[in-house]
Amino acid sequence: MPKLANNKRARFDYEILDTLEAGIALSGQEVKAVKTGQAKLQGAFILIRGNEAWLKNAHISRYTHAGPDDSYDPTGDRKLLLHKREIIKWRKKMEGERLTIVPISLYTKAGKIKLEIGLGRGKREFEKRDTIKKRELDREARTIKYVSR
């Protein structure tokens, strides 16, 4: 499963409680653009409207070899392909526990483009500082281990 795009801020800004794999409805030129690495998930989020889930604010550039298309919107809404029961279950969790659904990564699986989404609780500022401190300590411990050999 080669990763095509990754949302690094998702795991930093949110404590991910649950993940789910979703299909994504794309046009032909969008599929080619994503497979060539022209997709960005930073700042994107998932919105549930009715019984449908939508990816909002994800940037997929126009495929360079496609013909001119003035009506193409790179940050347009894209429908997520999920079962109705999954959408209802996640909506209940969102509303009951004040959680957010964020896209984590975009990858291919059996020739299809999939989106990993996560149900997350927003971290507070001090939790983010703790994450940075832990990362620095781990990095320091690894370098000391290599130096002492």
Image (cartoon, grey):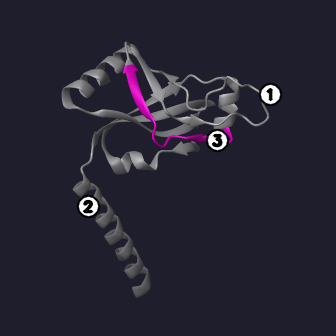
Q: Secondary structure at mark 3?
A: loop
Q: In the rendered view of the protein, which quadrant contains the N terminus?
A: top right
Q: Earlier in the sequence, mark 3 or mark 2?
A: 3
Relative to 132, residue 11 above or below: above
* C-alpha distance separating marks 3 and 2: 33 Å
Look at mark 1 in the image and give the residue it sits on.
67
Badge 1 local density, few (<14 within 10 Å), some, or many (20+)? few
Q: Residue at x 34, y 15 (%)?
A: 85
Taking the image as drawn, is residue 68 in sight?
A: yes
**Outermost residue toward the bottom in this view:** 148
Q: Amino acid at mark 3?
A: Gln
Q: Residue at x 24, y 50 (%)?
A: 124
Q: Secondary structure at mark 2?
A: helix
Q: Secondary structure at mark 1?
A: loop
> Quadrant location of residue 93?
top left
Disc ID at residue 130 = 2
Percent from the top left, x then y, of residue 35? 66, 38
* C-alpha distance separating marks 2 and 1: 49 Å
Q: Amino acid at mark 1?
A: Gly
Q: Amino acid at mark 2?
A: Asp
Look at mark 3 in the image and give the residue it sits on.
38
Residue 34 is left or right of residue 88, and the answer is right
